[in-house]
Every structure is written in C-alpha cells, then in structure tokens.
Amino acid sequence: MSSATPTSARVRRLPVVGALRLGRPSDVWFKPALSVVAAVAPPSLLLMTLGRLDLAPYTMAGSLCALYAHNRPYAARAKVLAWVILGMLGGLAVALVSASLTRNAVVLVTVGALLAAVQKAVCDATRVGPPAHVILTFVSSAALFVPQTLGQVPGHLALAAAAGAWAWLVGMAPAPLRPHGPERRATAQALHAAAACAETARGGEEGAGARSAAYAAVHAAWQTLLVVRNRPSTTRRALERLVIRAEVALAAPADADPARLRSWARAVRGTGRIPRTGDPRREEDGLSREEDGLRPDGVGSRPDGAGPCRTDGGARLDDDSLRRDGDLLCDRDELVGVAAERAVTPRPLWSRLGPLTPVAVRSALGCALAGYVSLALGAERPYWALVTAASLYQANITLTWSRAVQRVVGNLVGVLLFAAVAPVAQLGPLALVLCILACNFCAEALIGRNYWLGSVCVTPLALLVTELPGYQPTGELVTGRVVDTVVGALVGFLAAVAVTNRRAGRHVERALTTVDRAGEHAARVAADPSSTPAALEAARRGLAAAVVDLRATADAAAGEWWQRALPQERVVLAEQAAHRTLAATVRRRGLLPDPGTTSTYTYTEGASP
C-alpha cells in the first residue's frame, strides 16, 4: 500500500441545476415501459369489466413487479422476478394485517418506516434494481392506510399474487425471441466503454473517468455473463471472448482500435451472428472474421469445413472440444478462468447487509419522522411523505440531496399534470384505466433521462390510483400531495444529514487493502511460468472486480459529510498500480506483446486486437 499522505477533504457544493440536467435515454427504455403496460392492462381491464375497479390497487401491486430485472439474463431473471414478487407479497401481507388490526396512524407509520428500511437494505444488498425498493415501499405503505379486515386479507393477497404471476410471464416473454438479449446488451456496453477509453487515450487526455467507466462496464458485463451458473452456450462463450477483447483494449488503450470495438458492439446488439474475434496469437494463420463466425443457425464451423461445433441446440460441447488445436474455434485457454469464476459461491446475504446498517437507520428514521410530521399537519395520506423520504436515500449525502431536488421538482410539475389529466380520467372507468396506463408508460420511458422527469408522470399515476375506489376532489389531492412532498423531502434529507455513514472511510481503507492484496496475488500468478490459465484468469478478474469496488466505494464516501479526510491520493495510486498489473496479466496470457518488443498487432478489418 502506498504511504502517500491523505489529502484534505474537499467541501462539495450541493448541486441544484446539475441535478436536473437530462441525460441520454436508456438503451432499453421501451422494455420496462411496454412491460408494465402489458402487466397492468389485462387485470385492470378485467376488473373494470366486472365492475370491481376498487380492487385494482391490489392487482397493480403485483403488476408493477414487471419493472424489475430487465438487465438480467433470462435464467437469472426468472429467479429474481420470483423473489421480487414474494418480497412484494410479504410486505403487502404485513401492511394489510397491520391495517386490519389497528387504525392508529402513528403505529401504521412506524410499521411503514420499518418495512421501508428492510426493503431498502435487502434491495441494496442483492442489487435488485432499478426501481429497487421504491416500488415495494409504495405498495406496502399505501396498503397500510386502506381500511381492511382480517377476512379480506387472503383475497387481496391472492389478487396481488395472480397479477404477480402474470407480470412474471410478461417479464419472461421475450426469452424465446432473444434468448441472449441481456448478455448481448451488456457486452455491447462494455465494448462501447472500452472504445471511449481508447479514444481518450489517443487524444492525450488523462481519461481517469473514462477508464473507470470502462472498467465498470466490463465488470458489469462479466456479472451479467457469470450470473447464470449452468454450463454456458456457444453464444455466451462468444460474448465472453468479446468482453475479453474489451479487457485487452483497457490494458493498452493507446493501441486499441475504437472503430473496431464499436463495430463489434453494433453487431452484438442485433439478432444476427456474433462476431468472433479469434485469438491474436494466431492472427498469422489468416483466420478471417467470416471464418471465425457463427452461422445464423447457431453452429460454429471449423476453418477447414471439417464439421460443426454445435451449440446448446444440438450436442453439447465436451471439455476436449474446447482445446485450441488449430481446428476448433472454441478457445479453452481464454475461457477456462471464466468457468472457474462461475463456480465460485456468492457471498451470503447476511454478510452483505452489515455495511448497509447506516443506510437502513437513515431510511427508518427519515420515513418515520416524515410520516409523523405529515400526521401533525393533518394529512390524510401520510404514506406520501413516507414514500418521498424513502425514495431519497442514495449512496451518500450528495446523491441524496440531488434526489431530493429531483423528487420535489418532479412532483410539483406532476401535480400540475394531474390537474390537467383529472377531468379526462373522471369521464369514466375506461378513461381512468387508460390514463393510468399512459402514465405508467411515460414514467418508465422518461425516468432513465433523469429521475425528476419520470416523477412528472409518477405523481399523476399515484394520484390516479387513489381514485380507483372512487373519484375524489382534485384540489384536495393536489394540495395534500404538494405538502407531503415538501415534508418528506425536507425531513428525509435532514435525517440523512443526522445519520452520516461514518463507516465510509473504513470501507475505503478496506477496499484499498483488498486491491493491494488482489494486485499482489495477480502479480505473483502472472510472474509464475507454471500458472494455469484458470489461476491467471481468476486472479485477473478478482483484481478487476476489486478496482471497480474501490472506485464505487471512494465515490460513495466522497459525498458523505462529517467524516475524516479521505485518502484520495492513495486511491488514485492504487488504481494506477492495479491497471498496470492488469495489463501485465493480459500480456502474460499472450494477448498483448511485451513492452519493448518489435511485435505489434494491427487493427485492420477482420483482425482482433
């Protein structure tokens, strides 16, 4: 570890205008937008036909689960969606039972705050999101203030479960058409990020931000590819090789070809053949990109035309067929480490919950206080203030402030939109359902550009849901929403300031130690001529994951208040040393020439970096 002296902490301004700046829309914004409409529409229209639109809030609780896991491979998505639905049902059950046992508003707000804290901690620990805990908290908090009897609870839970099952089917519906769609998108993002890093390096810029973003994108791609622990298909192996090429570009960004990386990224995003990069150590053999490709039927051919290398659709590849023997295009050396990493057991959930204690305390305290203040002001729906507070809490104070600004601005504009939409929604049940569907679609289509823009549509959606049991005066709804928004944002942010994450500095120290140890281990493995490919790949990926975690931990800690100065210089030095070690491990594999040699790899059409 470097002995550099820690730098003084820099006072950060709390952004206002910057928090409202619009970004680029998500690459797959239409997927959650269409999914939530497909999940909400059938149950709502069925209940409307039966004249029981008052039950739609319960089916909508299950339908909103369709918003989750769109970035997960379908095998993993099936499990994540199932757990989200079970989590939603658990929170809803606690809320409905509590509502049936007491009408004491203070008790109900306390239950809602505790549920919000648990939902926040579990979603952060399992990295379920977006939309993470906010939807679950909205469902459970709203249910706390719906008049209920114990006899009604099973039926209402059954409605939510049925809608949740339909949402599961909606989420899994694209699997037959694009079975590797999520993996393709993650790989394309890694290639694009590596290209951006290479362009920065060629321009002579320092490029620390671009390099960190590229490593994060590559790490995310590996997480997506490795989350499914069954035996990978030929398609997934081809995607893994492309991610390896992104890693190679990061090891030597000045020598990489951004155009080639972006070309691969474009090809991967489609539904056609995945470009096969081959092995740079065999470029002299003259393998062309066409020869190294996958046919549309999923069969990888041998260069000599001797026979096919079948994918999952036919006979599975055995281990011997993954040898680099000059015939088969399946490169065992490059992928054996991936298989070793796939076999590693994930950390248990309880070990990931410990560091989230300050965030959970923030959520519980902020949500409870926001609800109590709202009650003191005479609010009929204190859960609006509770949910507003719950939605604020991010990785640090600075991000929490930005979310507070976004939430307030979005809600204030949203109530104006509701005032304009309400007369149309009150024309009849069908008009109300159609307005709810439109708000659902627009919210998911816009929220990727900035949270406040999505909140503009989420606010009228929440207000329209309150009208499902019966129409209510628009003026009262607007006034109550504005007051609860301001109360929730103000009290929630003050709670975040009061409960500072004082462990953030210690987390940075631990992350630095982890990077140092991972770097030393990777350097030893790279220097050992007897190291196996599996050991080298495991060491390299372990170091890459540690670097990504260090940057995320340092960024989160930098936005906290009331703590000692962070060792910013040590963080930068540790990242630089780790990047050099990662480059050495890539050279040890022969994917890059050693520094100072005359051998170079050119980046021409059909060649791999």
Image (spheres, grey):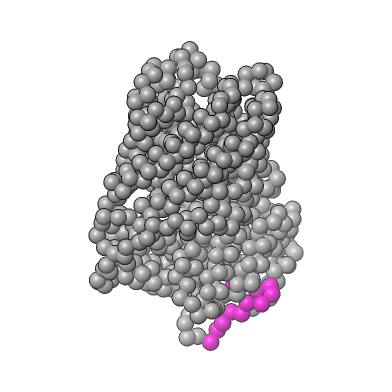
Q: Quadrant of residue 305?
A: bottom right
User: What is the total number of numbered labels drawn onto the structure image?
Assistant: 0
Task: Locate residue 541, reporting x and y percent.
Answer: 45, 61
Q: Quadrant of residue 262?
A: bottom right
Q: Residue at x 49, y 47 (%)?
A: 409
Horizontal arrangement in the rendering, residue 524 relative to residue 438 (left or right)? left
* Whether residue 355 is situated above or below residue 107 in the rendered picture: below
Q: Looking at the image, which residue sits at the far top? A: 151
Q: Residue at x 32, y 38 (%)?
A: 365
Toward the viewer: 438 or 534?
Answer: 438
Asked whether residue 206 is in view, the answer is yes
Q: Looking at the image, which residue sits at the far front? A: 475
Q: Quadrant of residue 425?
A: top right
Report the span colored magenta: 598-609
* Whether residue 461 is situated above or below residue 511 in the rendered picture: above
Q: Residue at x 47, y 26 (%)?
A: 143
The quadrant of the rendering that contains the C terminus is bottom right
Toward the viewer: 580 or 534?
Answer: 580
